[in-house]
Amino acid sequence: MRHELSREGRAFRLRPIGLHDAPFVLSLRTDERAAGRLHPVPGRLADQIAWLSAYFERSNDWCWVVERRRDGAAEGMLGLYDVDRGAGRGEWGRWILRAGSLAAAESVLLLYEVAFEELGLDEVRCRTVAGNAAVLSFHDRAGLERIGLEHDAFEFDGAYVDAVEHKLDRRRWPAVRALLSRAAEQAADLEARRAAS
Amino acid sequence: MDDRRDGRAADGTATRAALEQTVRDTIGVVLGRNIPAGDPLVRDDQPDWDSLKHIELVFALEGALGIRFEAEEIGELTDVDAIVELAEKHGAA
């Protein structure tokens, strides 16, 4: 949906995605490093624009561009969707960062802050392609709880793949926030070197 | 130049073998497992070498090797050989 919800971290920020981001999103999603690890990818710019236009019409769907604070460079994207504020839960995903980005910890930290502290959710879930070991490890290490395996969760060019589902609830949030905050601080220190060089 | 048993050449500089062993030991500490000699340890093939561990590894390597990687190099630390080469470039001893 169209929203004005932004969130600032030390090195990165989340800003609402716009139609003008379509070329960037397309480039992210077609990055060969991401091949096989994403939801089906609209392969043309027109398809991406159509996807964003449909997204703007969904009321329970927040999508952001991850942006570097020092120069506004786009680093990636992520989203929080299927949000049921009455039930206090939602799902997050569409998480993709450009290769070499240091925004992983802080971008996810900011998303959880939005979910728990701004939207007042009690629980967020995420589903990861079962073969995406690095992201599964990230969620495990961050302290999320693995709650199941969903068979044939995603389709890629006609082939179905399984997904691992993780959950973070309000009870675990403080510990996860502490861990991600430390990692985000370290990443920001490294990012500061880039600014200085 | 003959290499001595302690992994240092006669002029006192670390040999590549000694440097590589330090890199392997450091990665092993961060990942919590032994990294055997000869294992190229390519990041993309290591499920536990995620983006959180990568940041931790950068600081651990810098501490162990007494160097400071350039910011642009952080994404290039993708396997043992690449790390050793960058460490050599920075004069790791």
Image: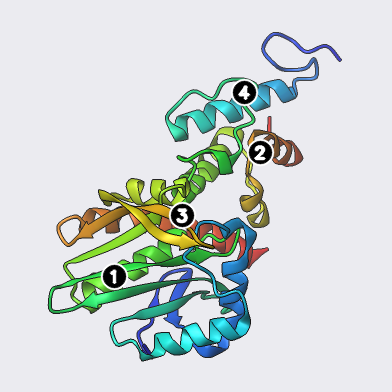
Q: Are marks 2 and 3 on the same chain?
A: no
What amino acid type should be assigned to the residue bearing mark 3?
Gln
Q: Amino acid at mark 1?
A: Glu
Q: Residue furthest top?
A: B5
What amino acid is at disc 2? Ile
Q: Are marks 2 and 4 on the same chain?
A: yes
Can you give x and y, in whole percent of width and height, for residue A112 in the image?
30, 67
Q: Which residue is mark 4?
A: B21
Chain ID at mark 2: B
Q: CA distance from mark 4 to mark 3?
A: 25 Å
> Which residue corresponds to the image point at 67% horizontal and 51% vertical from the top-left?
B73
Mark 2, residues whose alpha carbon is within 10 Å: few (<14), some, or many (≥20)?
many
Mark 1 lies on residue: A113
Query: Where does label 3 land, which residue?
Result: A186
In the image: residue B79, left or right of residue B16 = left
Quadrant where the image shows the N terminus of chain B: top right
